[in-house]
Amino acid sequence: MIRLEDLWRTYEMGEQELHALKGIDEEISDGEYVAIMGPSGSGKSTLLNVLGCLDTPSSGRYCLAGEDVAGLSEVALAEVRLRRIGFIFQSFHLVPRLTALQNVELPMLFAGVAPAERRARAEVSLDAVGLAERVGHKPNELSGGQKQRVAIARSTVMDPGLLLADEPTGNLDSRSGGQVLDLLAALKAEGRTLLVVTHDPAVARRADRVLVLRDGEIVKRVAGDEVTDRGTLFDEVGVGADVGSAG
Amino acid sequence: MSLFDLLRFSSQALAQNRRRSGLSLLGVVIGVVAVLSLTAIGEGALRYVEDQFTSLGTSIVIVSPGKNETTGGMPHGMGGVPNDLTLRDAMVLERRVPSVRAAVPISISTETVRHQERGRNAPVVGATAAFARLQRLEVATGSFLPETDLDRGASVVVLGSKVASELFSDANPLGETVRIGSWRMRVIGVLRERGQQLGMNVDKIAFIPVASGMRMANKSSLNQIMLELRPRSDPEVAIAGVTRLLMQRHDEEDFTCVSQDAVLASFTSILGILTMVVGGIASVSLVVAGIGIMNVMLVSVSERANEVGLLKAVGATRSQILAIFLLEAAMLSASGGVAGLGVGTMLVMVGNMLYPAVEIVTPVWAIVAVLTLSLTTGILFGVLPAWRAARLDPVAALQGH
């Protein structure tokens, strides 16, 4: 379970203080699929980075499975990212010189998994995303949808309980995007907690819950199936059509 | 992360940018080659000098007039003039110092040597028959100076090969008369060509009996006395005996007595220091190469910020990132070092083929030093870029900043 208590993230911009997150309070249960929406600059990416232990909150508590991870050391945070969290990015972030298999093997490299086991597990992961035939291909030999599926294989190869996705379908056509969303749904079905930052109502609709952020605060919580189109969801919180340009 | 995984990951990264890696590697190669070839030349010179000394064979002690004050301060016997080093001294030394086999008194002057209308300036060395044995001089035709009493100055001369060929062209000089200064001397021998040896070119010298030489130059003092020691005698004991005897005769230490071993030792140490200095200067180029590596690594880190961010996101610690980039720098410099060793060795081989007279050898210490140095410069100059990579903020790095 994830519990956020009065979570703040403040940036010092010269003499000014910029509050990216202003006292977020939220609980996310294990196995929940939560979409985070909001206009650009609303703090949704910052929230995702803090949840992923890539960024540390300025104040407040972030408890991951009962452990306060906000104050952990750099090494301990790396360990949390390694074993308990998987990342999926809008721009895939595959290492261009490595094959699909080697990209999926990367986390296990840092975990010190033996080469034979590494290879076997990476093959299983790639098989699960339907890319068993593509293990030897480099990223520039793969389509966008295939790249994102390699990234998903990489994010799950250490079997983490929490998956964080930042606009996972943002760079994909609707068909590839649909495949990726199906894969995410399957990962949720395996019991993983899923947090997806998106501006796409079609993505949000598949979530159990949707959190809407504005100016660093959660301004609305709705069920996924309440999301119809972007207009009705955001008109109530006064962000309107600005949502479409969120990055 | 195992060392093997690290090596593979880093080498893949280097291979991605072959030209850039290659160019920074070239810098190391040049530095290593510079150090290796320069120290090899220094070592070659050292061996050459040692060979020259050992070719003289028997150990030799040289007595020269005047005291070499090496400690500074007031000159010894202020106001006084040092006593001459005389033929008599030489005779006494040969007779009364047990370890001395032969004493060769030597006087040196420069005169014009003429035959008919040809002439040249040449060093004229007054010596004795034993000089040829001491210096391993070989006679091409005729004979060297005759064995006579020291004070008998016969009017004979032995010509160096170059002097002979200049004065006589192809004609046989034996029995001919040459004029040295205002003296007429009969040529009794011509030396075999020898070349430069220890800063003295025997080929350009004319040898005459020492008594004649002193008379010709109108000198009362010898330039030096060369003492040939008996086999297996200790030069230090000989020097002590010579010093004691000459002190008795001169009442003060107005002469200098050095063994050839001591001269060789100082040559060796000078050349050794010179080799180190030259090698040290050359290794500055390795430092420059290190800066080249640093530059390449800094560019690489900023180009691969994205990758660094990703590695952090998938769980790499700072020290793992540091190790990856440090290893890249180390691999660059180490492979540059090995390649430089190969090129340097080839250069030394080529040098040996071109100049067989001087044996150029890369000293082992230089090989060890240059490999260690190139590796450490790589690591040293790799620290800053690797540290930067390790300290990258993953959020900013993933956005490509």
Image (cartoon, coloured by chain):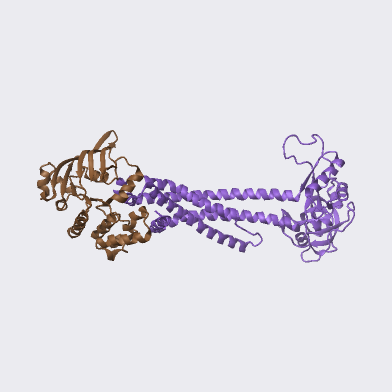
Q: Quadrant of residue B16?
A: bottom left
Residue B400 visible at all = no
Chain B drawn colour = purple
Taking the image as shown, residue B354 lies to the left or right of residue B296, namely: right
Looking at the rendering, which quadrant does residue A114 occupy?
A: bottom left
Viewer-nearest residue: A85 or A65: A65
B257 lies left or right of B18: right
Q: Along the horizontal axis of the image, is B74 left or right of A69?
A: right
Residue B101 left/right relative to A146:
right
Task: Pinpoint residue A120: horizontal percent, then vertical percent.
Answer: 32, 62
Q: The brown chain is which one?
A: A
Residue found 43% across the figure and 55% down from its top: B3
Farthest-out residue, front: A66
Q: Where is residue A76 in the image (x, y as percent from the top left)?
A: 34, 45
At x 44% / y 47%, what residue is drawn?
B383
Picture quadrant where residue B8 is located? bottom left
Above/below status of B141 relative to A235: below
The location of residue B346, given as percent across then percent down, is 56, 62
Query: What number of labels is visible?
Result: 0
Front-most of A233 and B159? Answer: A233
Q: Is residue B189 visible?
A: yes
Q: Nearer the viewer, residue A243 or B347?
A: A243
- Picture coordinates of residue B237 (x, y %)? 80, 47
